[in-house]
Image (cartoon, rainbow, N blue to C red):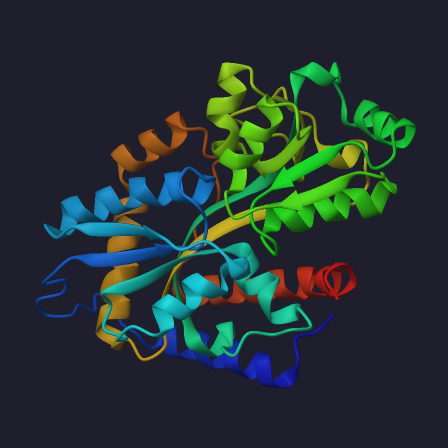
Amino acid sequence: MKLPRRRFLHVAAAAAALQGVPRTASAQGYPARPVRIVVPLPAGSAPDIRVRIIAEGLTRMWGQQVVVENRPGGGGIIAVQAVLSALPDGYTLLYAVASIFTVLPAQRDKPRFDVNRDLIPIGLTSNEGMVFAVSPKLGIDTLGQLITAAKKNPHQLIIGTNPAGSLPHLAAMLFVRLKQAPMIVVPSTGGTNEAIREIMGGRFHAVVEALLGLRGALDAGDVKALAIMARARSPTAPNIPIAAETVPGLVALGWTALVAPRGIPPAVVGQLTEDLRKVMESTETHARLERIGTTPFQPAFAADLVHFIASEQQLWWPIVQAELR
């Protein structure tokens, strides 16, 4: 699927604009007060955990507090609107999850904003496969066994995910469709933490989330990982099989990126890009992200990130339109 011409032009224009921002650009005196990063998912979700590490790195670099604010709901619409309603001065940023760019624009009920026009990508901060995990009480060890159990007990097994329209939600729906597995997918604003509580209470049976968001529950034995929806095994969890080995085509890569609202001064964009690059490349950030199980990935900034997002939209929009319309 090709991007519609109007959207392609927005992407191309954004890439061209970012290429014109000098890498050494800076905004005199920025930041002069605390910076807010809005997250479209609940506290404790994988993106929330990761951005707090990044925020701490920026806080140390700037000498100004970087505050993380969780605004879940509406598939990311609430968070995006909060950022777009603020002054585009660099003091309110968005920690975008993949679904904001790959799901929202492709739904039938489109938001009033245009993510390709109204958001400026700064830097990619993660890119990893979603993990399918289940309650150990099920006595299931493989994705194939889960499919068999679902078909023996149709519409009795429940998968909990992050809010509706998020990538974990869409990945769970894709799994059900690809294998015709009669399971119920239940998204919630409480996200992964709520799904795990429901699993521990015996009301839910499975959850889909990035490895980082499941790390605590996996270590505690509250859930058991069956498969990772990536193209290769994760170096940080090599014992988790690839989902596509059991369900061909079941690949769902969850990525996150720091973005800014349209209208932000180019010099601030340049400084944000360089400062985020330094934080992401620092030894301390690498070590902290590795300790919490972040999968190694190829960073992308500015124009490279714009092109990456465009390729992800071409991949996911047909799937979203088939699943969520």
Q: Name the quarter where the C terminus is drawn.
A: bottom right
Number of residue marks: 0
Point 60% across, 50% down: residue: 167
Percent x, y of residue 277: 30, 52
Q: Is residue 262 above or below residue 299?
A: below
Query: Is residue 286 shown to the viewer in this render?
Result: yes
Place residue 88 in its image quadrant.
bottom left
Left or right of 278? Residue 203 is: right
Which sits in the foreground, 198 or 290?
A: 198
Q: Is residue 41 left or right of residue 142?
A: left
Residue 195 position, x and y percent, is 57, 34
For residue 23, say whether it is visible. Answer: no
Q: Going by the image, does 116 lie left or right of 107?
A: left
- The part of the image, by quadrant, that contains residue 202 is top right
**Residue 103 spot, x, y in % from top left:** 61, 62
Whether residue 65 is situated above or below residue 284 in the rendered picture? below
* 274 vs 183: above or below: below
